[in-house]
Image: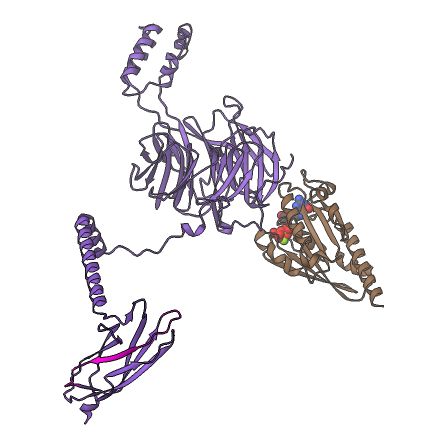
Chain colours: A purple, B brown
Amino acid sequence: MSSVESSGDGGRWLDAHYDPVAGLYTFSSCVDLADLSGDGESRLVVGDLGTGSSGMKLKVYRGTALMSESVLLDLPAGLVAFFMDLHEPRIPAVAVASGPCIYVYKNLRPYFKFTLPSLEINPLEQDVWQQVREGQIDPLTLKEMLESIRKKDDVPLSIRSLRFLSLDVNDMDEFVQLHRQQPIRRQTVITCIGTLKKSTADEDGVSCLVIGTENSNVFILDPEAFTILSKMSLPAVPTMMDVTGQFDVEFRITVACRDGHIYILRRESDKPKYCVELSSHPAGLVRIGKNVVVGCTDESLQGFTQKGKKLWKIILPAPITTMAAMDLPTRGFQGVLVGLANCEVHLYRDKNLLSTIKAPDTVTSICFGRYGREDGTLIMTTKGGGLMVKILKRTAAFDDRDSAPGPPLAQSVRLNIPKKTKLYVDQTLRERENGLAMHRTFQMDLSRTRLAAARAYVKALESSLTPVSSSLSEPLKMNAVVQGLGPSFKLTLNVQNTAACRPIMNLAISFLYDENLYKVRNPYMRIPLLVPGLIYPIETFVENTNDKGVSDVIKVFVLHEGKSSPLLTAHINMPVSEGSTLN
Amino acid sequence: MGLLDKLSGWLGLKKKEVNILCLGLDNSGKTTIINQLKPSNTQAQEIVPTIGFNIEKFKSSSLSFTVFDMSGQSRYRSLWEHYYKESHAIIFVIDSSDKLRMVVAKEELDTLLNHEDIQDRKMPVLFFANKMDLRDALSSVKVSQKLCLENIKDKPWHICASNAIKGEGLQEGLDWLQDQIAQSYQNNEQVKA
Ligand SMILES: Nc1nc2c(ncn2[C@@H]2O[C@H](COP(=O)(O)OP(=O)(O)OP(=O)(O)O)[C@@H](O)[C@H]2O)c(=O)[nH]1
Ligand SMILES: [Mg+2]
């Protein structure tokens, strides 16, 4: 027992225990935490694979110490702790799946063994073995006949026939002698196991076992009677699964399969409801709330909705060795722990990397939950058989920011885009169909507008209609103000020399108007010398001589002495005389 | 007569208010220890996990004790710091058989000692390495190593192994604590004089 040095995670985890030679060889599917003695202290239950051919054991740890171990007959494929009845005190049973059987332990003693129903046997194969039993054919003929049956391949051969076919000619006789009296059986094996609450969502509610098998089936077993409650079939062999919901109400089984697909099974149907095609094989499957996070062998981590819609994908720095959920309801935290081949364990919330834990060896199994009396305990075993326990600090906080460099947080904030209306959809369709014509029409109108503008401009320039003179020698600006209600108006013309420094001289103003309507007091005025920048108000009075409420335009010309064409022209729309109507 | 009664008798002090804060992880045995200090006729028969905290008052001829028995559950540990200011001594209880959570006990102790209301005060800290009767319990020496108690330089501290259920080891610790409190009062008196 020793302590690992700082795990390099900003001090969020306490190193509670590390035993590099614990001799635990297992995977995440064979590890669980459960209060096996009902004293409020959770134990660690591990299905140890030993060397892979021997030394398989069921081990139970309490705190830092191995509390009990018992021999397993076969390699464990999965292990779960579950409540199988309502007895008090509430002590969970442990189910170990290995080969075609589930071994159920209660109080750590073998309690029940469930075996999968045997499969249909090829009648031809049955016949051949019958003949062998009666001594009608010798081993070599048997071999030939079995091989021809195998080639037809409608119903696969039994394990015994397959074993026989793999034997050396010398060993055949002995094998036949040994086995020929027993009936042949064909059996599938369990590939993965999970639990499903029967009718309540309670923490200690009774759960059904859910198992996936090598012949692409998923079974749901009754917790007490171990009868098959439901059978579902998949297009491929399941390897990992996640189960949520309640059997009697509504449930959802997410299965990663050996064909690189993820299938989602629902209560109503015995066939998958949704399917996700992955770009490469799944290496880990974790459900977080309603979403599923899948780790793939192409070193990617991908998020999907419960209907199989892809949400995100990130690339990891190394291949995935194992994955587990980190669920801490007391602090409302949910994340995914990903063990990597580079001896790191990454914690992700969605696609954000929240923390990196460095391990002294490659981590092969991860389990997070309540261990002992500590809710936030992370248990990892390593390739070399080490056991590592870390405890999340009470004060540890994970900010939502990604600790990996990348796009800013704001980029992933969803914009509040309103729903598409029918009008919008119609318009979009129209645009898609008539895009070319619309573009042409628009371009033509644009050209016309430009032409009209250019013409107007030229006309204005030719007739000096602009209130701004751009002539280089006399740059001028003028605006006119009309004051009064009528019939007398005061007309003020503000003239400004816009040149930088040169004054302008010898300018005059004259008016053109309908003499039947208006009388201007000074129809011709000289403008004094214009100093650059100053505004000169030039005033005169206009009398509307008509009492019928008619108004007209008065044109104002700024002229240079000795030139006939005006420098500036302004049209003043005279207001209707209101004074005259008052009389 | 309860232990604290004796304690105040020996001190021979005028009735002074002494606040003692009893801290430690959940299930370490704080409530069991305090229960042992009560007069035997008022001792509780069954001890349940503390919710929030309990206050126990002990009157003696010269001293009036208030013991704050805090809950050690992680969700209540944030309450501890609100009582640091008024307390005059700390009893820190450790379950010496819970090897896994020694790091957690150390973490909480470090947080406590570095708190601004504790840091610069010379208050005595008494450690009980409790549950010494259990087979896999660590010795008090081992516990003080695990908690790095030798690093506490500016506070008087003492550790003793205890069995709260039988009341073993509690006396030794309390004797030490009474000495410390008496000393600090004498010092205070000298300062005042
Ligand atoms: N074997 C043994 N058990 C003890 C000892 N001291 C306490 N216990 C047991 O430990 C358990 C917890 O004791 P409590 O006094 O409730 O612990 P606590 O520190 O007050 O816990 P919280 O109130 O939850 O913070 C009880 O079941 C006690 O009987 C001891 O010295 N030896
Ligand atoms: Mg208590």
Query: Is B167 one of the magenta-colored residues?
Result: no
Q: Is residue B153 left or right of residue A176?
A: right
Q: How many marks?
A: 0
Query: Is A507 one of the magenta-colored residues?
Result: yes
Against A13, residue B70 (above or below) is below
Against B148, residue B23 (above or below) is below
The span picked out in magenta is A499-517
Q: Is residue A74 left or right of residue B11?
A: left
Task: Give the image location of residue A510, x and y in percent.
Answer: 24, 80
Quadrant holding the C terminus of chain A: bottom left
Please identify the dominant SS of the magenta region. Answer: loop
Against B23, residue A100 (above or below) is above
> Is residue B28 at all visible to an observer of this figure?
yes
At a point 53% along the width and 31% down the height, the residue shown is A362
Residue at the far front: name it: A562
Q: Quadrant of residue A421?
A: bottom left
Q: Quadrant of residue A564?
A: bottom left
Return the residue nearer the eye: B131 or A574: A574
Task: Give the image location of residue B48, x and y in percent.
Answer: 60, 52
Task: Give the image location of residue B56, x and y in percent.
Answer: 68, 60
Quadrant holding the N terminus of chain A: top right
